Image (cartoon, helix red, strand yellow):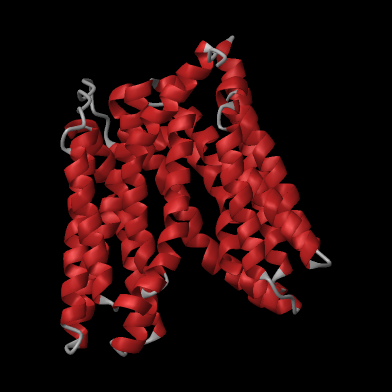
Amino acid sequence: MPAQHPSSASSQSVTLQILSIVFYTFVAFICIGLPIAVLPGYVHDQLGFSAVVAGLTIASQYLATLLSRPGAGRLVDSLGTKPAIVLGLTGIAISGALTFLAVMLQEWPLLSLGILIIGRIFLGIAQGLIGVGTIMWSITRVGSEHTARAIGWNGIASYGAIAIGAPLGVVMIEKLGFLSLGAALLLLALLALLLIRNKPSIAVVRGVRMPFWSVFGLIAPYGLGLTLASIGYGTLTTFITLFYIDRGWLGAAYCLSVFGVCFILARLLFTNSINRFGGYSVAIACMTIETVGLVLLWLAPSTGYAMAGAGLTGFGLSLVYPALGVEAVKQVPLSNRGAGLSAYAVFFDLALAIAGPIMGAIALNMGYPWIFFSAAVLSVLGLMLTLGLSRRKVRHSY
């Protein structure tokens, strides 16, 4: 059997160490994915509330994640990564117990809804803690030179878990009923808590803790580039089905699948290119590819062109987050990296939050193809901002 190249063995070791930590991200996002497809229907059909209330119930989790980002980052920096993840998993367990209780009390719809929303808030806070905690733990474990790989694998675990969790949630409800949803969240969280017990902690990095808004200011230029590029992600995932219906086409699900496969494959195959060529170069290349994909969607005369556009968009978007993230976290001291990662994540949350209403208004007034043109324009603005940041870095290096 041929001997393994030392650098290959080292790279594999780093990946395995990262995977052993982002496993907890995978568990968390399975728990986030399970209710996504079934909870709106439960609130609307079983509890009898309007579609608006059902939407707000789902949105309460994302709002909790967004508002808890500053606290999550500070907690990771001050308490350490493992305690933050343990708190997050405990939050998921509480969310599962509350979801189970809410279903038990569905004869009292208002009480059931209130308990359900509290459970969603716990889940949202847990998402913020575990997302930042696992990335920071991975970076501290394998070294800051592997930041891109840590962020990349964390993203793959997140998207992969939601892709598995959402259909699994539908099957569970059909076979076992809504009570199984809360029970599954509780059991998965308890299993993860059991597994994390014997995992060695990483010492807290000592140093001055900067105010969150000071960290936010340092991260903001990079975060704004992320927001401008990521609106394309929110646009495609939210509106591709309606775009297909508007054009009289079938197969929007295949288009989403092409987008998802290209997104994950690019992360798997090309994350190391960030270390080789630098975060700025990879972000610029990826935003260019994303823009071409969005323009192709805008001009698509048939489903074949639309799928090609979706694939290019997925490929382009895949490395924007880790590539700009590598450059963003360099702007803050090591003792504030948790706050830095939280601040950076806020900008991705913002992109997803504003993509729906902004692109919905454009679709209403100009038609669905123009949402992709608009996303392409925003991607170009993100590209120009990233070019400016890279040139500033070159000037400062002399």
| Quarter of the image where one finds residue 319 | top right
259 sits left or right of 335 in the view: right
Residue 302: x %, y % from top left: 81, 67
Residue 155: x %, y % from top left: 46, 44
49 w.r.t. 97: above or below: below
Residue plotted at (71% across, 78% down):
246
Look at the image and tell me in which quarter the N terminus lies: top right
- Whether residue 330 is visible: no
Residue plotted at (68% across, 78% down):
245
Residue plotted at (38% across, 37% down):
341
296 sits left or right of 150 in the view: right
300 sits left or right of 202 in the view: right
Q: How many marks?
A: 0
Residue 280: x %, y % from top left: 60, 29
Among all residues in the image, which is located at the extreme top?
A: 398
Residue plotted at (65% across, 32% down):
387
For the residue pair 169 and 205, the one nearer the viewer reads as: 169
64 w.r.t. 101: above or below: above
304 w.r.t. 190: above or below: below
Among all residues in the image, which is located at the extreme front?
A: 1
Residue 71: x %, y % from top left: 24, 44
151 sits left or right of 192 in the view: right
| Quarter of the image where one finds residue 113 | bottom left
| Quarter of the image where one finds residue 165 | bottom left
- Whether residue 45 is visible: yes
For the residue pair 198 and 206, the one nearer the viewer reads as: 198
Look at the image and tell me in which quarter the C terminus lies: top right
